[in-house]
Image (spheres, helix red, strand yellow):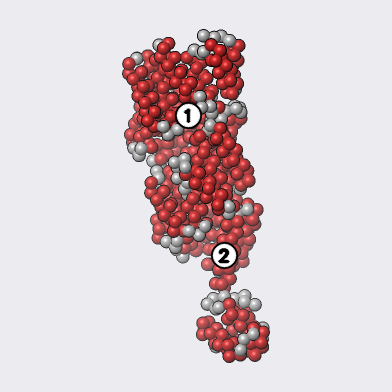
């Protein structure tokens, strides 16, 4: 084997986490004289991190070299990681083969016993994603025990991540996040190897988002951003980082930056960070939907769905915006029925919006009550804002405008404090509707003007269109049961014009004007032109 200058460069670069330099130099050394097993393992790690397709073939060579050198522990560990990479790519049969090989090595050689905990991780994940959270909990706990027994920090971190995911999925958010915090302490202290560290960052951020803990999500996204920036040639995890950045930009109203981050993430995904595809496509779809670019959003959600994950609630909300509420309702009801507890909670606000659009207030109330029941007493501010907004919207449709107004005003304060302008503006529209029911038109108009200004600044074309429709509906409501022609007649009566003058101005016969005026008196219960004039002024028809 070689001790060439290329090898020395490669080892130095690997220690400094310059993954591209490490890969190039180690590959050069391997081409010169072949690498020993440990260095082949380093070459495989560098390949995985820069998104090279040579990662699994190189890891396979490392596994075989470890076996040949009699290092059963390292051989088994390499086999487990090959299996996990294949599982992540959806190649379950080859992954199963590698897990079985790792298991045989562990069983046949006591020196490899320490890998047993790591080998339990994919089994636990299989149980978790196969709908057996109790089985997953037991297996993750067993893996944690074995990891602690052998002081295997990677296994300890992955087991704790798994336990946290199960606990959060079952509603035990506080204990789940406590486990996350333990893992991230080890990650930031540099106790975990690069691949598990990246997994930990992305897993923690993803579940923080699902649990509406955006404070934690923001903090760990910033940390992941710095971690990736310190390794600029790393492809793995970098696309996912951009997807998380896009979601935070979206929340805070920086939609252009969100789209830029999503597109940067797509570039990274295509270079090798395959796990980023769903997040970056979904983020693009969200920005495009909110802007009213429905065709582009449709395509983005379709591409997100090709990864195997349902693009909900975004796609359902797109169908609603396209004027297809029945399809939206079907899509989201089906997706929510199949989702785990945490994912279902994230879908419920959109489902409530869609049920209300379908005028199924009873279904919206059931969903709102479920959401309230799933919310811990000491909920995160964003979750509190979401719950209050949903409950307020349903109360408004139930005819409890005063209670709705109280809930919605509390929600607006939270959205404002969270610096979430789009959601705050949508909340103001609900507030305006409640104020109108309570006959406070001046306050309602102020809320709508503020919402319109925010939507215009964001470029939220669909929301601006909805505001225009609401204004038209309010104008029609103000006119009561009168037709447009009857309104014209009343306005001219209020201006002091006779039937003959009105007929001349509207190019009608006097008989037709008299007929319209008779209809006005009948519809409004009036008996004179003076009463019609008073009505016109009271209802701002003139």
Front tag of 1 and 2:
2
**Gap between marks 1 and 2, in whole Å?**
50 Å
For numbered disc 1, what is the local secondary structure? helix
Is label 1 in contact with label 2 (beta carbons under 8 Å)?
Answer: no
Q: Which residue bears the numbered disc 2?
A: 469
Q: Position of residue 63 (x, y in %)?
A: 43, 18
Q: Position of residue 427 (x, y in %)?
A: 55, 56
- Give the class, few, some or many, for how many residues have Cα within 10 Å of label 1's Cα (few <14, many ≥20): many
Task: Report whether residue 467 is seen.
Answer: yes
Figure check: 270 above or below 251:
above
Q: Quadrant of the C terminus?
A: bottom right
Task: Report whether residue 529 is seen.
Answer: no
Figure check: 540 above or below 525:
above
Pick the residue in front: 412 or 64: 64
Figure check: 215 above or below 45:
below
Q: Residue at x 41, y 12 (%)?
A: 68
Figure check: 16 above or below 349:
above
Q: Residue at x 55, y 52 (%)?
A: 295
Q: How many marks?
A: 2
- Give the class, few, some or many, for how many residues have Cα within 10 Å of label 2's Cα (few <14, many ≥20): few
Pick the residue in front: 540 or 109: 109
Q: Which residue bears the numbered disc 1?
A: 183
Q: Residue at x 36, y 26 (%)?
A: 97
Pick the residue in front: 509 or 404: 509
For numbered disc 2, what is the local secondary structure? helix
Q: Position of residue 109 (x, y in %)?
A: 34, 14
Q: Position of residue 285 (x, y in %)?
A: 54, 47
Pick the residue in front: 89 or 391: 89
Question: Which tag, 1 or 2, sits closer to the chain's start?
Answer: 1
């Amino acid at each position: 084997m070689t001790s060439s200058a290329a090898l020395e460069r490669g080892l130095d670069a690997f220690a400094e986490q310059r993954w591209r330099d490490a890969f190039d130099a180690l590959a050069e050394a391997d081409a010169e004289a072949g690498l020993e097993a440990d260095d082949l393992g380093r070459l495989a790690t560098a390949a995985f991190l820069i998104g090279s397709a040579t990662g699994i073939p190189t890891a396979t060579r490392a596994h075989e070299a470890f076996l040949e050198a009699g290092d059963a522990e390292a051989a088994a560990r390499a086999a487990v990681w090959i299996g996990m990479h294949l599982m992540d790519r959806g190649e379950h049969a080859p992954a199963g083969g590698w897990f079985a090989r790792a298991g045989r090595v562990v069983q046949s050689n006591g020196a490899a016993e320490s890998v047993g905990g790591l080998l339990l991780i994919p089994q636990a994940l299989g149980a978790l994603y196969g709908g057996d959270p109790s089985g997953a909990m037991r297996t993750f706990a067993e893996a944690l025990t074995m990891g602690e027994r052998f002081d295997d920090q990677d296994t300890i971190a992955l087991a704790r991540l798994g336990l946290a995911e199960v606990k959060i999925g079952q509603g035990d958010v506080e204990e789940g996040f406590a486990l996350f915090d333990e893992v991230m302490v080890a990650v930031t202290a540099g106790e975990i190897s690069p691949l598990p560290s990246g997994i930990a960052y992305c897993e923690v951020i993803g579940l923080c988002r699902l649990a509406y803990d955006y404070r934690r999500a923001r903090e760990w996204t910033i940390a992941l951003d710095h971690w990736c920036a310190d390794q600029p040639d790393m492809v793995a995890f970098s696309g996912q980082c951009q997807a998380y950045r896009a979601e935070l930009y979206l929340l805070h109203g920086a939609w252009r930056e969100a789209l830029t981050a999503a597109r940067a993430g797509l570039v990274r995904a295509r270079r090798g960070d395959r796990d980023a595809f769903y997040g970056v496509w979904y983020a693009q779809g969200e920005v495009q939907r909110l802007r009213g670019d429905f065709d582009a959003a449709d395509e983005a959600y379709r591409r997100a769905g090709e990864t195997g994950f349902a693009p909900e609630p975004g796609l359902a909300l797109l169908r609603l915006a396209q004027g297809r509420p029945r399809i939206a309702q079907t899509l989201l009801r089906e997706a929510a029925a199949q989702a785990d507890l945490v994912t279902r909670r994230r879908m419920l606000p959109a489902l409530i919006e869609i049920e209300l659009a379908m005028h199924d207030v009873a279904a919206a109330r059931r969903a709102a009550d479920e959401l309230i029941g799933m919310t811990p007493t000491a909920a995160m501010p964003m979750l509190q804002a979401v719950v209050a907004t949903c409950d307020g919207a349903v109360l408004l449709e139930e005819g409890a405008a005063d209670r709705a107004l109280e809930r919605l005003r509390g929600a607006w304060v939270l959205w404002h404090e969270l610096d979430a302008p789009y959601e705050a503006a949508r909340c103001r529209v609900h507030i305006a509707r409640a104020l109108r029911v309570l006959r406070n038109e001046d306050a309602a108009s102020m809320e709508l003007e503020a919402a319109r200004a925010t939507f215009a600044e964001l470029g939220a074309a669909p929301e601006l269109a909805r505001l225009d429709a609401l204004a038209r509906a309010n104008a029609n409501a103000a006119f009561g049961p009168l037709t447009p022609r009857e309104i014209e007649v009343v306005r001219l009566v209020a201006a002091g014009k006779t039937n003959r003058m009105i007929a001349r101005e509207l190019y009608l016969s006097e008989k037709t004007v008299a007929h319209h005026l008779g209809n006005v008196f009948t519809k409004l219960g009036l008996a004179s032109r003076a009463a019609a004039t008073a009505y016109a002024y009271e209802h701002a028809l003139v």
